[in-house]
Image (tube, rainbow, N blue to C red):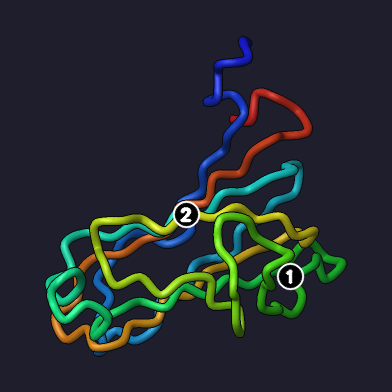
Amino acid sequence: MTMQDLNSNLAPVQALVAQTINQASGALVSGDVDLAGFNAAQIVVHFGDIVEMGVPPIGSAQIAVKLEHADDDGSGVPGTYANVTDADVSGVSGIAAGIVASPTNDLVPVTLGYLGGKRFIRATLTPTALTVGGPAGVIVNRGHPRHAPAI
């Protein structure tokens, strides 16, 4: 394993399979992502072609991205989830009520690093003004494994 071999040091999780998000679908919540055995995580929210996003007037349609984290409840499953704060993530700031981003452009994925010390994380995507909508999904890249290779 060389220092350039990132693949041996990442274990991606498809936290939310890409699916249509719009007002009719309501909020989409990812599965619980277990970070046990890893010292880092990157959250990537990706979008397909969403008709209302990126079209003027920018800002009328958006998807709020909320990130929460939880400790192990003692039985290997998440306890009560709480909103992340600025201290828990990198790549974004000004977090309020766990909302880490509110993108209005479907061509730019949302990426951020998780710095918090909890075992579990999850993301919630909440649409605003998306009548037609389009696909959105979440990948979590778990990194810096305690034992490599990660996969």
Q: Is residue 60 left or right of residue 122?
A: left
Label 1 amino acid?
Ala
Task: Kindly state the secondary structure of the residue where label 2 is placed.
Answer: strand
**Residue 131 placement (x, y as % from top left):** 16, 86
- Give percent across and percent down for residue 40: 68, 45
The answer for how far apart the CA atoms under marks 1 and 2 are is 20 Å
Q: How many marks?
A: 2
Helix, strand, or loop for circle 1? strand
Circle 2 is placed at which residue position? 111
Category of crowding for the residue at label 2, using alpha-carbon neighbours closer than 10 angstroms: few (below 14), some (14–19), many (at least 20): some
Instruction: Decide if residue 18 is on the left or right side of residue 4.
Output: left
First in sequence: mark 1 vs mark 2: 1
In this view, the residue in front, 61 or 50, is 61
- Residue extending furthest toward the right: 74
**Amino acid found under the numbered disc labelled 2:** Thr
Residue appearing at x 63%, y 72% in the figure: 68
Residue at 83% across / 65% down in the picture?
A: 75
Front of the two marks 1 and 2: 2
88 in relation to 27, above or below: above
Query: Residue 90 sits in which quadrant?
Result: bottom right
What is the quadrant of residue 55 in the picture?
bottom left
The residue positioned farthest toward the top in the image shown: 2
On the rendered image, what quadrant is the C terminus found in?
A: top right
Q: Residue 70 has which mark? A: 1
The image shows residue 84 at horizontal and vertical percentages of: 67, 72
Neighbours of disc 1 within 10 Å: few (<14), some (14-19), many (20+)? many
